[in-house]
Image (cartoon, helix red, strand yellow):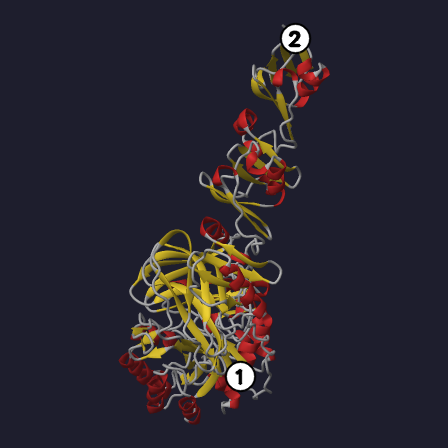
Amino acid sequence: MAKTHARWTAAGSVVAVAASLLGGAVFAAPAQAADPPVITLTFDDADGDQVAAAQILNQAGLKGTFFTPSGYLDATGYMTTAQALALQTAGHEIGGHTVTHPDLVQMGADEAKRQICNDRVNLANKGFRITSFAYPFASTSDAVLQVVRDCGYNSARGLGDLESKVPESVGFGFAEAIPPLEPMLTKAPDQIDNTWTILDLKNLVTKAQPAGGWVQLTFHHIGDGIDPTTNTADPLTVSTPLFQEFVTWLAGEQAAGRATVKTVDQVIGGTVKALVNGPAAPAPQTTGNLIKNPGLETAPLVAGGLPQCWAAGGWGTNTRAFSVATPGHTGTAAGQMVMSAYTNGDGKLLPSLDLGECAPSAVPGHIYQIKAWYKSTAPTQFELYYRTGLGTWSYWNLAASPLYNAAANWTQVTYTTPPVPAGASAISMGMNLISIGTLLTDDFELTDTASAAPAEATAAILAAATASSLGTATGTVVCGLAAGGCYQNYQAGVIHWSSVTGARITKGAIDAAWAAQGWENGGLGYPTSNEIGGLKDGGVYQNFQGGVIHWSPATGARITKGAIDAAWAAQGWENGGLGYPTSNEIGGLKNGGVYQNFQGGVIHWSPATGARITKGAVRATWAFFNWENGFLGYPTSNEITGLKNGGVYQNFQGGVIYWSAATGAHPNAGAIRVAYASQGWENGRLGYPTTNEFAIGGGAVAQDYQGGRITWSPTSGTSITYR
């Protein structure tokens, strides 16, 4: 069970707990006056302006709990380690908040342990006493709760489980129990943002005073909330005057005995448990496509989440929503972001900023090539980040790509990064929106251009280029492709090399068709020949590991593969009656079927029937009866000729279609077909069918033939009348 932003998921459990408490209280003794509520002031994310907030607390004699991601310490805009240690010395508590502040339920078990356990270890090694934890985004699950226990924490805070100014929280109750029923998921009101007033803040305290209990307030920025890296204000900001006013009032409530202010550790108590290290991170990947789940096809770990290894990102004042769109550029999934309102900042989908499960490995000084496919209603660009130290992710300044134009159709873009900064161990990137619009992204590639090209590849590519008319090279040999492949761009095309296929040239329309399938990562794999010309009507073709691409001036570049390609070959390729293909395979048919259009007909394939050709009048009649979705189903043979008077027929799962020049094409099925067979088909007295089956009343049907009629009724079966 996953739990995120608890006010939408915890209502039932709160009601259940309340009911059980009421049930147990029916015969209880009269209640005594409640103790004053305990108020805890918590601060999330180690934002640098919280240091000034702590000084305000110090002046009022109050202490708070600061939940601090260890990967944020000493980063631009955040507290330094020295500042956080000074807070602890002054009596404030430092708590854990993961290393990089991820959504824990979207991660695998090992990465969650690294984030939670290593964060506590990192902070302890810096000199902090760590017993309390807070879930980033208030996102947790039963499994994550257990990890927090296993990592040695005494408690963990959620959000949105107590009543506040947020309308959806009505009825949740005003305070957590002391001690909490579940210390690994303690209740708290929603986080405080720039819409809260002094009355909203006071209400969190005063509404808890009649019954007592524990209320944890959650702050982020105190001041103007301006992020120095983006120069924009964070909505999760409380102004300094408002915070000062509330703290002064709260100190007065404590002095009057109407509230008590404590840290989380003071409320929960308990000893400091032994440190537990998380699992070692996976070994860095340095070759091939460094993106995990590049096509976004691997489903999320929790329902409704993003594809594995992908996370939502962004900053500033805007409204963005992330989802999975179907279909993708290839496969069934693409990332979709809708920016419905925009003031500043951006939004993006990018590989998870984690400690090794998903984040692409990087080598300082190396240059990386990024490829991605996108569709967008607004301009977009790549934004980049890099990881250093214990897990600090930083915006890669001056590394963003140029803006790419809006694109109604799937479009691939390629961008080469600057050299990776010193100390970096991983990078991440996403295509963003900086305006209202909808962006779809899919089929990402990230390769290290510094991967050494094998001498065999360099020599083979050079030889292929020398023997071609590609012109001069426009880039260096780039390796790290699938199966250890390499490529080099030239003025008039590209040469790809792999140890299995050698060096092969792709260019023009065939190269574009291959690119649309994901290059060597798609179903076609690497090319196994260069273009071969001399075909009918000026056509050319090129062989690939997974199929063939044919091109002609009339039909463009089209892919054939598998059983459909074999069926076309059996008809003489483009020289047969089918001519050239006019589409690629098209899927989504009944029972997993696919089809492909050709100049002279169509080839349909299904697992049960194989690849079969339909054309002309027979195909038109099958289409009239709704193709494979009608009673005929899929064809089970090609057209069979040699019938009387030049006729043909074709078998289908649900019957037969007959055609003759005199009668046209008509289906024949069921009991009427059995009766027709008993008369010798078209060679008998009935000849060819001249109509389709038609109703004659009373549930009966009939079909006319050149020499008579076959009638069927549910009561009397079939009967034949001759002309």
**Which residue does the numbered mark 2 point to in the structure image?**
721
Q: Is residue 66 left or right of residue 671?
A: left
Q: Is residue 518 left or right of residue 319?
A: right
Q: Residue furthest top?
A: 723
> Which badge, 2 or 1, comes first in the chain's sequence?
1
**Mark 2, secondary structure of its residue:** strand
Quarter of image, res 196:
bottom left
Q: Is residue 347 left or right of residue 242?
A: right
Amino acid on which disc 1 is placed: Arg
Nearest the viewer among 3 and 350 is: 350
**Which residue does the numbered mark 1 point to in the structure image?**
120
Residue in the image at 38% along x and 77% along y: 219
- Label 2 and label 1: CA atoms lie apart by 91 Å
Q: Position of residue 89 (x, y in %)?
A: 43, 94
User: Is residue 424 in view?
Assistant: yes
Residue 527 in the image: above or below residue 626: below
Q: Residue furthest right?
A: 678
Image mark count:
2
Residue 659 in the image: above or below residue 378: above
Q: Position of residue 475 (x, y in %)?
A: 44, 66
Residue in the image at 65% along x and 11% along y: 686
Q: Mark 2 or mark 1, which is nearer to you?
A: 2
Q: Residue furthest bottom?
A: 89
Nearest the viewer among 539 and 306 is: 539
Amino acid on which disc 2 is placed: Thr
Residue 131 in the image: above or below residue 679: below
Q: Position of residue 286 (x, y in %)?
A: 55, 72
Residue in the image at 44% along x and 40% along y: 553
Residue 708 in the image: above or below residue 194: above
**Mark 1, secondary structure of its residue:** helix
Nearest the viewer among 48 and 456 is: 456
Q: Residues within 10 Å of mark 1 (few under 14, many from 20)?
A: many
